[in-house]
Image (spheres, rainbow, N blue to C red):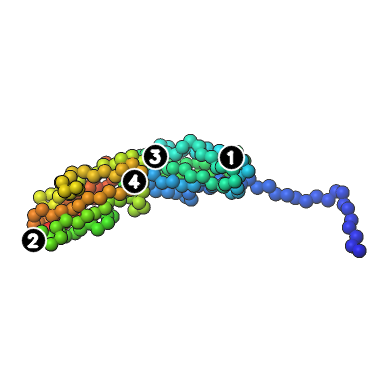
């Protein structure tokens, strides 16, 4: 039979590591007035609710001041909104956890990558095309807008914008949405530029050729 020896003064080192929270990686990009829902994560499933505080380096972005990871989960969602052009740093911290920081890079949005945008129109053929504009961030990711966002549509002597059978001079992306639709219509022969603009977006000014 094996013989076991009891050694009363024997010791064993046990390492206890403080877990670290995680956010959305090194950075996320947003346009002004756009938002994205990201996750705040703990390293382990929680045995009781864990409150995570969120603080900002500056006002370029906004989040709730805190979120709670519920019992039996290891993450919860947080809405990050672009407020002004600039780079913010969000710090997440909680009792018993190492804090973590991630950047939010906010710049002017884009509407220059549009579905089915025409470069030519024909008065005798296809004189109008239904287009969809998307609210994108500076890296071309499609983002939701936090409030209704109106774009000015500036036509030309050759091209107009139409919705519901009427000529329009603006279009609105609804709060919580990411796109809007309207028709681009050729009205007379010629080549000219039109534009889509908003103070928080880079103006899109394509050239359209209208043929007979």
Estimate the spatial distance between the alpha carbons at disc 3 and disc 2, rounded to whole Å.
Answer: 49 Å
Kindly report which numbered mark, 4 or 3, lies closer to the viewer in this rendering: 4
Estimate the spatial distance between the alpha carbons at disc 2 and disc 1, rounded to whole Å.
Answer: 68 Å
Q: Earlier in the sequence, mark 1 or mark 3?
A: 1
Q: Are marks 4 and 3 in contact (CB under 8 Å)?
A: no
Give residue 212's mark.
2
On the image, which quarter does residue 85 sit in?
A: top left
Q: Is residue 66 above or below residue 74?
A: above
Residue receiving disc 3? 60
Q: Earlier in the sequence, mark 3 or mark 2?
A: 3
Q: Are marks 1 and 3 in contact (CB under 8 Å)?
A: no
Mark 3 residue crowding within 10 angstroms, few (<14) / some (14–19) / many (20+): many
Estimate the spatial distance between the alpha carbons at disc 1 and disc 3, rounded to whole Å.
Answer: 29 Å
Q: Is residue 49 above or below residue 185?
A: above
Estimate the spatial distance between the alpha carbons at disc 4 and disc 2, rounded to whole Å.
Answer: 37 Å
> Is there any visible trace of residue 108 in the rendered image?
yes
Kindly report which numbered mark, 4 or 2, lies closer to the viewer in this rendering: 4
Residue at horizontal 44%, vertical 39%?
A: 63
Determine the secondary structure under disc 1.
loop
Q: Earlier in the sequence, mark 4 or mark 3?
A: 3
| Percent of width and height locating residue 11 | 80, 50
Residue at horizontal 10%, vertical 50%?
A: 157
Q: Earlier in the sequence, mark 4 or mark 2?
A: 4
Determine the secondary structure under disc 2.
loop
Q: Is residue 99 above or below residue 191?
A: above
Residue receiving disc 4? 177
Residue at horizontal 22%, vertical 47%?
A: 196
Is residue 17 toward the left or the right of residue 132 in the image? right
């Amino acid at each position: 039979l094996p013989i076991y020896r009891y050694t009363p003064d024997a010791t064993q080192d046990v390492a206890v590591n403080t877990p670290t929270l995680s956010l959305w990686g090194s950075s996320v990009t947003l346009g002004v007035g756009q938002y994205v829902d990201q996750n705040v994560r703990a390293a382990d499933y929680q045995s009781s609710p864990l409150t995570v505080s969120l603080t900002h380096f500056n006002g370029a972005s906004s989040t709730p001041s805190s979120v709670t990871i519920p019992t039996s989960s290891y993450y919860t969602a947080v809405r990050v909104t672009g407020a002004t052009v600039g780079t913010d740093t969000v710090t997440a911290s909680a009792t018993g956890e190492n804090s973590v920081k991630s950047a939010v890079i906010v710049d002017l949005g884009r509407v220059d990558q549009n579905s089915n945008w025409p470069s030519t129109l024909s008065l005798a053929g296809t004189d109008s095309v239904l287009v969809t504009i998307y609210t994108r961030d500076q890296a071309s990711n499609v983002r939701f807008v936090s409030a209704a966002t109106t774009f000015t549509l500036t036509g030309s002597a050759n091209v107009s914008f139409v919705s519901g059978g009427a000529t329009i001079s603006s279009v609105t992306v609804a709060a919580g949405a990411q796109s809007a639709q309207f028709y681009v219509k050729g009205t007379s022969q010629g080549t000219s530029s039109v534009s889509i603009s908003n103070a928080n977006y880079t103006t899109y000014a394509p050239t359209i050729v209208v043929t007979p």
